[in-house]
Image (tube, rainbow, N blue to C red):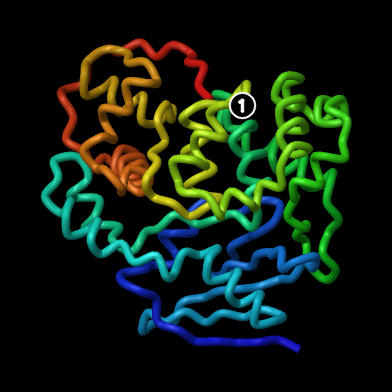
Amino acid sequence: MTFERVVRPAGPFTLADSTRHASDATRHVRDGTLTTTLRVGERVEVGSARQTLDGRIVLRAETEEGLERLRFAIAMDADHSEFLKRFARDPLIGETTRRFQGMRQLRLPTVAQTLLRAFCGQLIDSRRARELECLIVRALEPRVPRTTLHAPPTSATFARLAPARLRQLGLHARRAAALVRICRAIDLERLHQLPTEKAAAFIERERGLGPWSAGVVCLEGLGRTERGLVGDLTLIKLMSRLQGRWVEGHETGELLAPYGEWAGLASLYLAMGFKHGLIPLPEEQPVRFPRPAYA
């Protein structure tokens, strides 16, 4: 049995803008429809979302609980109208808020997958990082019948592994050991119950992780917008262009500070604006980009 619900999102929402580069081992976007695997208790379901011409979202899942998980995954209830209004004239993201006003951060099916993404994302090459994440998920989780997608990993997925197995799949030894250690210590879904600052502090206390990883987990795993992606390579490049010198990862905290409780979403809009040339920058100056180490 399939449950279907047609709903209007809270505030401006564009599924196409929110699902750019969304495809991975647990979800894909084809012909405007996002299809994703979902963890609903002990079950794995498949859900889908597409947007109609009048802006409504057609949700499909196997159970009512799956529909709720799908709503969370696509962030359709996370109204960011206040963000758009407050920063419409911002010198850095004002133009991006107008061009991509319906863009929100898609969430991953499990917090454990988000933590894996944070560890893989410490690679400088973002494409290689995503490939590594996909390879690991596909190796560890079964393919869902009648799909090309795999089940989302959980804390138990990694807790039962020896770190050497993750090392064989390509994850650095220290990162593999840290991922296994964390997942053996806690069911990461419990972070949903913590305030953002406590959840972020938990991540940052762990060896091999830092502010950037905490931002990834908060934004893509917990659906919180308060924590920005401090140390993100794109933001480092943007701020370096603005400053005319190479900046350190921690300095991007100053770039995000003006956005307050919206720093996480601002990270997304800054990166999009930089990519599409929507941020006013000084005339091209030679800025040497070293290979930063960020977590």
Q: Is residue 265 visible?
A: yes
Give the x, y percent position of residue 213.
53, 33
Left or right of 62? Residue 102 is left
Label 1 crowding class (10 Å Cα cut-off): few <14, some 14-19, many 20+? Answer: few
Looking at the image, which is closer to me, 92 or 190? Answer: 190
Q: Quadrant of residue 168?
A: top right
At 15% across and 54% down in the image, what residue appears? 88
Which residue type carries mark 1?
Glu
| Residue at the image point whose x is 60% and y is 87% from the top | 4
Q: Which residue does the image show at 19% across and 40% down from the upper left?
A: 92
On the picture, is 188 further left or further right than 80?
Answer: right
Q: Secondary structure at mark 1?
A: loop
Q: Is residue 24 above or below residue 263?
A: below
At which x and y percent is residue 258?
21, 38
Q: Which residue is mark 1?
A: 206
Considering depth in this image, is 170 or 221 the residue closer to the camera? Answer: 221
Residue at the spot x=51%, y=26% of the render?
210
> Where is residue 244 shown, x and y percent of the image?
22, 15
Camera-side residue of 152 and 24? 152
In front here: 104 or 65? 65
Query: From where the camera sits, is residue 128 visible?
Result: no
Number of marks present in the image shown: 1
Left or right position of 248 against 37: left
Query: Residue 32 at what x, y percent from top left?
Result: 52, 70
In this view, 284 is above or below 48: above
Question: Where the N terminus falls, by quadrant?
Answer: bottom right
